Amino acid sequence: MTPIIFISLLAASNLFLLLKYIRYRHRFKQKGLFSMWPIRRVKLDQLDQIFHTNKFGPTFDTEIYFIGRGNLNVTGGTSDTEAWILSVLAKKSKRIFEFGTCTGKTAYLFAKNSPPDAQVITLTLAPDQLKEYSKNAHDSDKSTEDALHESAFTDFLYTNTPESRKITQLFGDSKHYDEKHLKDKVDLVFVDGSHAYSYILNDSEKAFEMIAPNGLILWHDYRGPQDTKDVFKALNKILKTKNLQHIEGTSLVAYRAPNE
Ligand SMILES: C[S@@+](CC[C@H](N)C(=O)[O-])C[C@H]1O[C@@H](n2cnc3c(N)ncnc32)[C@H](O)[C@@H]1O
């Protein structure tokens, strides 16, 4: 083998190893293996006693009405595990507030699984309201594009179903939403509107106002420093003043309000 061929082969194999290293570093970082994700992970039975188990696993307390997604594409949707968790928690919630309706699948599951006299309020941006959206200098372009792209619905999965009588549909930008009349009155808040940094902070502030004693706030899409990085940054900031928990095996983060 000539020295030129030897050096070329050495350079090629080094390049190959470097590319492999970069690829795995990205993957490890995303999974939180290099830098720890700041929000502590918990199992479901640490989140709420409804998820307690017996020798068979979760009990009939967690039985629900369900529409899965399997491996099908659903705009802005939750995973099947997340949808199950949200539906189970709805069983014990009299008033539920959702930031971000999208297809209305979660709103439907909330209505279907909650007690008969429950109210589900869901707020979303309609396609003719995009001018109301206000991007801030800290918001990534990607999160803004996604928020506007997903603001495409004016009718929903629950439309024309019996469950719609439990659902109050609101349209508008969440930065303009006045939550004062709901102060301390909501048992379950799901923060899943715009995933831009300034919106996560805005919607969270409103969620903390609305949440009833012992109520739960859940955020969607805590996926690490690469994917949905604005959600990651905003929730890590909120962690400095609130006790947040990351539900293991999901992208959900939870906050339990004190039981006054
Ligand atoms: C990720 S999707 C919500 C998915 C839904 N929660 C579910 O589980 O099926 C995000 C939703 O937030 C809405 N949205 C985006 N920006 C908003 C804003 N500034 N104010 C209110 N809603 C907003 C979008 O219209 C979209 O419907």
Image (cartoon, grey):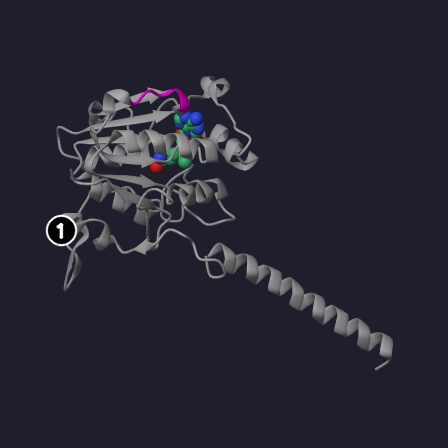
Q: How many marks?
A: 1
* Residue bearing mark 1: 60
Q: Give the x, y percent position of residue 205.
A: 35, 31
Q: Nearer the viewer, residue 60 or 155?
A: 60
Residue at screen point 44% across, 57% down: 36
Left or right position of 250 against 86? right
Q: Is residue 60 above or below residue 133?
A: below
- Please tell me in which quadrant of the rendered image residue 74 appears: top left
Left or right position of 203 against 217? right
Residue at screen point 13% across, 51% down: 60
What's drawn in magenta, residue-wise? 175-179
Q: Give the x, y percent position of residue 93.
A: 18, 36
- The reply to whether residue 152 is in sight is no
Magenta stretch containing residue 34, yes or no?
no
Q: Quadrant of the N terminus?
A: bottom right
Left or right position of 152 against 47? right
- The reply to whether residue 115 is in sight is yes
Label 1 crowd bin: few (<14), some (14–19), many (20+), radius 10 Å: few
Amino acid tagged 1: Phe
Q: Give the x, y percent position of residue 5.
A: 83, 75
Residue lying farthest to the front in this orientation: 241
Residue at screen point 14% across, 54% down: 59
- Please tell me in which quadrant of the rendered image residue 76 appears: top left
Q: Nearer the viewer, residue 249 or 232?
A: 232
Left or right position of 8 against 193? right
